[in-house]
Amino acid sequence: MTSARPPHAAPFACEKRPATGSRGMVVTNHPLASAAGSQMLLAGGNAIDAAIAALFALTVVEPMMVGVLGGGVAHIRLSDGRHLILDGLSTAPLAATPDMFETLSDEIGKSRDTRGRENLIGPRAVAVPGALAAWCEALARFGTLPLAEVLAPAIALAERGFVASPYLSDCISDCAPDIASDPGLSALFLPGGSPLKPGERLIQPAYAQSLRLIAQAGPAALYEGPLGEALADFMTTRGGLIGMADLAAYNPVAREPVRGTYRGFEIVGPPPPASSGVHIVQMLNILEGYDIGGLGFGSADAVHLMAEALKIAFADRAVATADPAFVKVPVGRLTAKAYADERRAGIDLGRTKRWTPGLSGGESADTTHVTVADAAGNVVSTTQTINGLFGACVQIPGTGMLANNYMFNFDPHPGRALSIAPGKRCFTSMAPMMALRGGKFAFALGLPGGLRIFPSAMQALVNLIDHGMSLQEAVEAPRIWTEGGALELEQAFPEAIAADLAARGHVIARVQRVAGGMNAIALDADGTLTGAACWRADGTPVAISGGLARAGVRFSI
């Protein structure tokens, strides 16, 4: 791991261990998805093949997190050094309107609450899916293996089943009342009326058939064919807004990344409608004015400064980050070092404050992340989701496909940067980030966690660059989060630190975890790849070494 400071012992214990290899690395939030990705690398495929295979497998083994009816963002670094952001985020249906939901509050943390939870659960919460289109486009443009081969592991997992983990079982229990309202989901996840238990086998034959249709027809199976017709019919009968015209109109968007610098590293991330690239660069610019490494990881001063940077970013994000096709986003201004100087000047080291936007402008905790690197230098960092846990908690009859609830990501109040508009892309906190040093790949990382994603990714970058942590330490380190209300601290922060921060005016909330399971890959100077996944999910790195026999070798018996 390349860092700005020499590594030192972290003030916490890691629960998992990293993997190292020289020929490839796949890290996902489920071991069977990591196995699916590594199978592609072992078959001669590249990082893009592996990432897409892993994502399809995750739709089977992490059905509460990701699906072909979801959306996401892929950050691809090609072997020639080019970076591309492939935006497969969901869009509002053509029949959507800014006032389609009745709002209940405008308070921080409650501004997306609507009557009947219509933007969260049920057919009206479903946005036009983008995941399948984006995955297939990435594979067609940059992969080397046919779609049917890449889909094979996922189909096998759906047909033969897999053993449920405690994590999956807990997620089912958390959503049991909403799952019970849908016959298809209830039959799968609440057998006999009780949540699927750890160790029990989950078999999804209807979904296996849907995946077979996709293997045969490609994305047209959904956007023009029988899977799309099933989705549109369901929406028509249940009060949803998506029709075949919405599906036919959907296209992924290739975007140039946002770039910034931090203590000798180039930071590269997705642009709007993702908020991560802009605001991670903004926060790092603010923190660059302090000796964060010298303050020490977890010190009250370091935590206070990160909390203030987070609040500044969220204040600006509320007015300035949205779908650039609908809102003019001042990316250059937000990522400028001079703007960071202006915002930093208002920080009081001894006292927290309430921040307002510094300029005028023109989500959900249930997501997954995949990080893959191959021996040729291709790297993929991609975050994908059906948004909420089990999405809208509806399954499209006869298909096994779970619908997203991406409409929750929009601001249900009209007249704002993030308000609903027909065809508008959902904004997101997804943060598939990469860092370069001297133009060379250094590390890639990402995680699920809704609004807490990009602040957590920023903290991991600080852990690596300022605190000289190992990759495993950086992803497992205790996290903080705030957007202007309470300052959330994970349990590993000492009580003395919490008391010091409270004395500075922070309202402290102790939480079990901030955001979800981060995974990451780093490249050492000798070509060794390191993969790491944290304790907050079932993350598993799979490393590949060795290789083919020396050219010209012949054996005889």
Image (cartoon, helix red, strand yellow):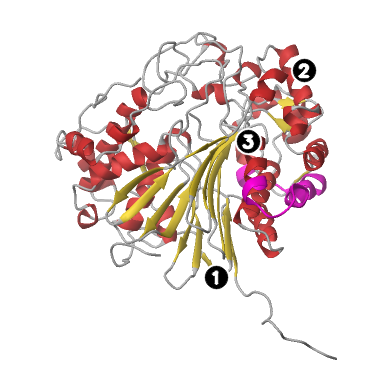
Question: For the point 73% across and 13% down, which residue is it?
Answer: 236
Q: Is the magenta stretch mostly helix, strand or loop?
A: helix
Quadrant location, the C terminus = bottom right
Instruction: Locate residue 328, reporting x and y percent.
Output: 38, 23
Instruction: Locate residue 29, reporting x and y percent.
Output: 58, 49
Q: Does the CB distance between marks 2 and 3 fall below 8 Å?
A: no
The secondary structure type at the circle numbered 1 is: loop
Instruction: Locate residue 190, reporting x and y percent.
Output: 73, 33
Left or right: 241 in relation to 82:
right
Left or right: 334 in relation to 99:
left
Write down the residue under mark 1: 22
Mark 1 and mark 2: Cα distance apart in space: 49 Å
Q: Which mark is residue 131?
A: 3
Q: Pointer 1: residues within 10 angstroms few (<14), some, or many (20+)? A: some
Question: For the point 29% across and 67% down, which residue is it?
Answer: 6
- The span picked out in magenta is 139-168
Write down the residue under mark 2: 233
Mark 3 and mark 1: Cα distance apart in space: 30 Å
Q: Pointer 2: residues within 10 angstroms few (<14), some, or many (20+)? A: some
In reply to whether residue 148 is colored magenta, the answer given is yes
